[in-house]
Image: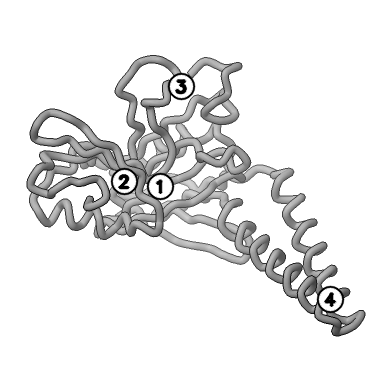
Amino acid sequence: MRRQNLRLEDIESFRFMERYTPVPEKHSKQNKYGPGLLTLKLKDGNERVVTLHARHHPSSVIRTLLAHGITFSNCRQTQAAASTLPEETLYRRPSLYLFWYIILLVLFFAMGFKMLMSGFTPLQLVLGCVFFLLAIYTLYLLQTRFCYLKLKKNELCVYSSGRKLHYPYTQLRKVNFDFARELNFTHVMEVLEQDYRYHLFYIGRVSRKQLREIATRLQQVGIDATCSLNDEKKHYHDIYHVQ
């Protein structure tokens, strides 16, 4: 807020996890999309939009706004049609990007071991460390950028390489699907828990054509779930398909 020269007493309400589209023109630079969008409606009638990255601690920002009595205008409490879903459904598809990142991981580890085992000259030590750092970063991407989902009867499960997270439906307040700003990782899922803890998942292993179905099923158990994606567009700036 300080960087935006805003005072809390100047804010009337806010919207979070929602696209900012002040103009109807498709792909206008004034329109904003992607995760972490916080739109602040000021008491003078103007609006300011801020992108909250992980380093900005979105959970703390939302809690601070609510603690000062500022209205969360796009957080809707929906009536649950049921407390559980009738059946479990796995949402997962093959990913060519995932295959190439696995190849890169193996290659970086192999080159790192090769550099360190072939000698201990300064150049070989530096190259070996570089390859190992690249391997660790690639492993991080495999764990965070290629998630897929499973809707169980009473919880949402998020899976990735070596990681599995469980979120009971009663623990979730809001879920939103949108395009990622990085074209290689296509789309994301934003999750807001009942205590306003915020999570962001890159769900590239879920077909974008299934995201509206997932949002609809989450609404059935009382979660404010929204989907901003067009089923046919490959990414936000795909001009070959209608917005």
Nearer to us of marks 4 and 1 is 4
Q: Amino acid at mark 4?
A: Gln
CB contact under 8 Å: marks 4 and 2:
no
User: What crowding class fits label 4: few (fewer than 14 Cα within 10 Å), some (14-19), or many (20 or more)?
Assistant: some
Secondary element type, mark 2: strand
CB contact under 8 Å: marks 2 and 1:
yes
Disc assigned to residue 190: 1
Nearer to us of marks 3 and 2 is 3
Whichever of labels 4 and 2 marks the residue nearer the N terminus, that label is 4
Q: Amino acid at mark 1?
A: Glu
Query: Seen from this angle, which residue lies furthest right?
Result: 118
Where does residue 32 sit, x and y in percent of width and height?
A: 39, 32
Distance from Cα at disc 4 to Cα at disc 1: 42 Å
Secondary element type, mark 1: strand
Where does residue 223 sit, x and y in percent of width and height?
A: 31, 44
On screen, residue 26 versus residue 101, left or right, reads left
Q: Is residue 78 visible?
A: no
Q: Which residue is mark 2?
A: 174
Distance from Cα at disc 4 to Cα at disc 3: 48 Å
Residue ID at (48%, 62%): 165
Q: Which residue is mark 4?
A: 124
User: What crowding class fits label 1: few (fewer than 14 Cα within 10 Å), some (14-19), or many (20 or more)?
Assistant: many
Q: Amino acid at mark 3?
A: His
Q: Is residue 152 above or below residue 72?
A: below
- Of 136 and 152, nearer the camera is 136
